[in-house]
Amino acid sequence: MIILGIDPGIAIVGYGIIEIMGNRYRILEYGTIQTYPNQSTDQRLKIIYDELIELIKQYKPDEVAFEQLFHQKNSKTVITVAQARGVEVLACVAMGLEIYEYTPLQVKQALTGYGRASKIQMQEAVKRILNLDGIPRPDDAADALAIAICHSFTNKFKSEFKMR
């Protein structure tokens, strides 16, 4: 099974693509899609959509796992991030993929056994589970890999995490 993990954003969208074969994990790709404040919102959303479609076409994931958005104090930021997440969801749905979502607490619990794990504890867990020499960078990509791993761990219960 191939899982695409997405850490939603407008300036930086983290993605991580893993393949699971039995109990073995293999990274196929990870990185970020970046946009810049000097670009219009519609340009930024199109860049995110187009690049995500290309990743999906290239790696053909079976399922997609998103991190749920959490509320931020800056309402303008929340609106643009929500718009971007909508475009990210649309790209996946347009490509026929099933979407699942997890809270940051659920991701931390799945990877470390502790829902209040620190960023470094999460990154170390990703490194260990994927048998890497170092922590994946940037942080957004490491987060996306963590989301994909979380989904693989909860796969047997996935109907409760399916996006409604």
Image: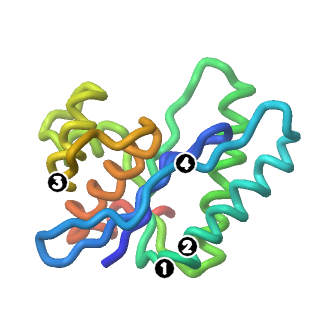
Residue under the image location 24 percent in, 72 percent down: 20
Disc nearer the start of the sequence (4/2): 4
Residue occupying the far front of the picture: 133
**Label 1 to label 3, Cα distance in Å?**
23 Å
Residue under the image location 41 percent in, 49 percent down: 144
Disc nearer the start of the sequence (2/3): 2
Local crowd size for mark 3, using a 10 Å CA cut-off: few (<14), some (14–19), many (≥20): few
Element type at marker 3?
A: loop
Disc nearer the start of the sequence (4/3): 4
**Label 4 to label 2, Cα distance in Å?**
14 Å
Local crowd size for mark 2, using a 10 Å CA cut-off: few (<14), some (14–19), many (≥20): some
Left or right: 148 as drawn, with respect to 21: right
**Label 4 to label 1, Cα distance in Å?**
18 Å
Q: Which residue is mark 4?
A: 32
**Label 4 to label 3, Cα distance in Å?**
21 Å
Q: Which residue is mark 2?
A: 56
Element type at marker 4?
A: strand
Mark 4: amino acid: Thr
**Label 1 to label 2, Cα distance in Å?**
5 Å
Closer to the camera: disc 2 or disc 3?
3
- Count of residue discs: 4
Q: Would you identify the image quadrant in which residue 105 lies?
A: top left
Mark 2: amino acid: Ile
Mark 1 and mark 2 in contact? Answer it, CB < 8 Å.
yes
Residue 11 rendering spot, x and y as whole percentages? 66, 37
Disc nearer the start of the sequence (4/1): 4
Local crowd size for mark 4, using a 10 Å CA cut-off: few (<14), some (14–19), many (≥20): many
Q: Which residue is mark 1?
A: 60
Local crowd size for mark 1, using a 10 Å CA cut-off: few (<14), some (14–19), many (≥20): some
Element type at marker 2?
A: helix
Residue 45 rendering spot, x and y as whole percentages? 76, 51
Observer-nearest residue: 40 or 90?
Answer: 40
